[in-house]
Image (cartoon, helix red, strand yellow):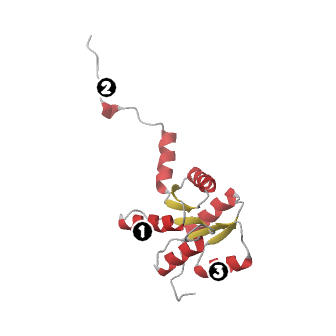
Amino acid sequence: MDAIEADPREAPRPKLRVRKKLEGFALKRPVLVVDDDTSVRALVALVLRDAGYCVVEARDGMDAIDCVADARDRRAAPFCAIVSDVCMPGLSGLDVLTVLKCASVPIPVILMTAFADDRLREEAHDLGAAAVLAKPLEMAALTASLERTVRRGRAPRAPGTA
């Protein structure tokens, strides 16, 4: 008896539950996570991936600006939000927020910091930050804040606007 070759087009399909999970994942938009601390960045990225987001990681503020510019150049789907540390070498999270605001890039930014005082919160608010979260992060609070931010689509206000 001759061996029967299987037609690759007739490969078994994934189970419905797996397909549904992948479909839900595909519906989420990309989030940019920015932190110079590799372990914090990896943990935040893992939590957001588990929440169904497509996560891109940046190691500092300049890398974040490059990621945003690259996405625009490739006409890729824009980031639905940026989650960024405040204190980083080079460009800080506030600097990233300022660059986005001045360039009229409509991406909402959530800032994370171990140094959350009233002055920093006020400056972040004035620059248009969607939220300022204190480190150590409560991951449930982060995902809830991100969900609210994405639903609202709150982006930095353009220069000269309140």
Q: Amino acid at mark 3?
A: Glu
- Residue 134 visible? The answer is yes
Instruction: Look at mark 2 in the image and give the residue it sits on.
Output: 6
Q: Which residue is most to the front?
A: 89
Instruction: Look at mark 1 in the image and give the residue it sits on.
Output: 69
Question: Gap in Å between the C-alphas at discs 1 and 2?
Answer: 46 Å
Quick one: label 3, few (<14), some, or many (20+) residues within 10 Å? Answer: few
Query: Which residue is more in the foreground, 158 or 87?
Result: 87
Element under disc 3: helix
Question: Which residue occupies 54% across, 60% down?
Answer: 59
Pick the quarter of the image with the N terminus: top left
Whether residue 8 sits left or right of residue 37 in the image: it is left
Instruction: Look at mark 3 in the image and give the residue it sits on.
Output: 123
Is residue 28 placed above or below 4 in the rendered structure? below
Element under disc 1: helix
> Which quadrant holds residue 110?
bottom right
Question: Gap in Å between the C-alphas at discs 3 and 2?
Answer: 64 Å
Q: Amino acid at mark 2?
A: Ala
- Residue 154 visible? The answer is no
Quick one: label 2, few (<14), some, or many (20+) residues within 10 Å? Answer: few
Question: Which residue occupies 48% across, 68% down?
Answer: 65
Pick the quarter of the image with the C terminus: bottom right
Closer to the N terminus: mark 3 or mark 2? Answer: 2
Element under disc 2: loop
Q: Position of residue 71 (x, y in %)?
A: 41, 64
Q: Which residue is most to the right?
A: 117
Q: Position of residue 122 (x, y in %)?
A: 68, 80
Question: Which residue occupies 64% across, 71% down?
Answer: 131
Q: Amino acid at mark 1?
A: Ala
